[in-house]
Image (spheres, rainbow, N blue to C red):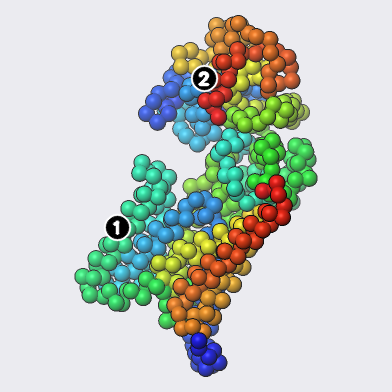
Amino acid sequence: MNDLSAILTPEFVSAILLPALIAGVAVSLCASLLGVSLVLKRCSMIGDGLSHVGYGTLCIAVAMGWAPMQVTIPVVIAAAYILLRLSESSRLGGDTAIALFSTSALALGIFASSKANLMTDVSHYMFGSILAMTKGDVIFSVILSICVLLVYLLFYDKIFAVTFDENFARATGLNVRFYNLLIAVLTAVTVVLGMMMMGALLISSLMIFPAVTAMRLCKRFSGVVMTSVIVSVGCFLLGLLFSLMFDTSVGASVILVNLAVFMIASLISVLLHRARPGKG
Amino acid sequence: MAYITCQDITLRYEALTVQEHLSFTVEKGDYLCIVGENGSGKSTLMKCLLGLKSVDAGTLTYGDGLKRNEIGYLPQQSQIQRSFPASVREVVLSGCLNRRLIHPFYTKADKARAAEQMECLNITALADRCYRELSGGQQQRVLLARALCATQKLLLLDEPLTGLDPLVATELYAILRHIHEEHGITIIMVTHDVECAVRHAKTILHIGKHESFFGSCADYEKSEVGRRFLGESVTQEHCSNCDHGHAHLPVQADGGEREAET
């Protein structure tokens, strides 16, 4: 175990830790908000699929010498639109279509980067490196996170309606396709931002864990959303602390803290059910 | 002009053509029940009326000032996720969304409207309860309150009685009568319970594989197809879904249908 007071020098804190902290909290917030909709709409796979596409695009961007984030975000937004259409109208079935599409994109990216001999350069996007984010990346992440947050808040009621009962929303004249697309675009942006810090392998669980934990504990949609945000930000901070103390990967530590919290929440919900038999 | 005019429409379910040359109108103030055997295209027709699916041929038009966002809809229970964490208030309020185009949040008027509908359906006490913890009948009332928030003109119901016990079904019919008569809301209901349909509706649309009927209830009872579907050798039995002691289908035929529907 590391001695925190030795690591936390003023230079480290102001140059590396603080920006990482701000970006991490912002992205965790977005991830947890969107996670609620993804889990309830039963399309958690979209988050995972988008992270594959995002990673593939990153590889190509690095191989070509383009700016990684600025190239990846529009591509992943386009992919989100395509994945949504695929899962709506596919003869293969949503999950299968997503898997085929996203692994193909991933393969293409790895193909390109191995051809350019850059596998070691891109491998850190696999596991994320929040402490290695540049100042530009941090500012970019925070601005985009604020945009995601604002859009989510503005459309909160409609996102609820579309998540709860899509057919009713469509039948009563709401533009469901637009709101689904909105959710997908916000998810895409969040996935790319999260990939920089958590890694492509772990970002989808950053979206799903807090939502599932909150669903164990809350009975109202608004409660689930708020609890999910609190769980997500709390787990991020704890995970970051652990990673500094034990010198472990930030992404992996955050997810493991999420797992622990999820298990505790499950236990609490089981105990609550026991205490009130017949309800539930 | 009628609220809904269907002219010579064809309905397909996947590759199968289930109805051809179907024409009917729904006037303001009507109470229309759509009946027919399983597989005759009732649910497909409902999807078309709701705009969830387009008709495969012919025309379906809205008229008499009816707009897309002035329709209320009560879906089949099975189509709602039963494990969704949402309070009754949140669900009912979401019915108000279609009249709110620019304003991002619920207005005072929306909240008042939701409260009024909850009062009307006697679920005010449940407002903060979790939707998934309610009984089937209570859930149905919540969804009905949501549908009434969405409309002041036309309410569409898709097999609203499936899975409800007889007492709750009777209650639901009484509620529908009330909102039809007191609030002047036009009703279109798809149902497999032809006995109750004839009892409560003004107009019947029977869609069958070979023959169809569209007209008043009285005419339907006299018509060939109606007599056959209502059962010519009726046994006097208490209908499980109505509190009226009217004629009922022979048990085998009716039981068989219900088995298949659920």
Estimate how packed mark 2 is, as few (under 14), some (14 to 19) or many (20 or more) residues with alpha carbons within 10 Å: some
Which residue in the structure is indicated by mark 1?
A104
Compared across the picture, whether B151 is left or right of A130 comes to: right
x 65%, y 23%: residue: B31
Which residue in the structure is indicated by mark 2?
B37
x, y percentage for residue A159?
A: 57, 53
Q: Numbered disc 1: what chain? A: A
x 74%, y 47%: residue: B127
x, y percentage for residue A50?
A: 40, 60
Given residues A274 and B64, the one toward you in this image is A274
Compared across the picture, whether A108 is left or right of A178 comes to: left
Secondary structure state at the residue bearing disc 2: loop
Estimate how packed mark 1 is, as few (under 14), some (14 to 19) or many (20 or more) residues with alpha carbons within 10 Å: some
Secondary structure state at the residue bearing disc 1: helix
x, y percentage for residue A81?
A: 41, 53
x, y percentage for residue B243?
A: 74, 20
Q: Numbered disc 2: what chain? A: B
Callout 2, which amino acid? Answer: Glu
**Mark carried by residue A208:** none
- Vertical arrangement, residue B18 with respect to residue A233, above or below: above
Mark 2 and mark 1: Cα distance apart in space: 46 Å
The number of numbered discs placed on residues in the rendered structure image is 2
- Vertical arrangement, residue B147 with respect to residue B241, above or below: below
Given residues B153 and B17, the one toward you in this image is B17
Compared across the picture, whether B107 is left or right of B74 comes to: right
Kindly indicate the quadrant of the structure image that contains residue B216. top right
x 28%, y 62%: residue: A107
The answer to whether one can see residue B135 in this image is yes
Callout 1, which amino acid? Answer: Ser
x 78%, y 45%: residue: B125
Given residues A74 and A207, the one toward you in this image is A207
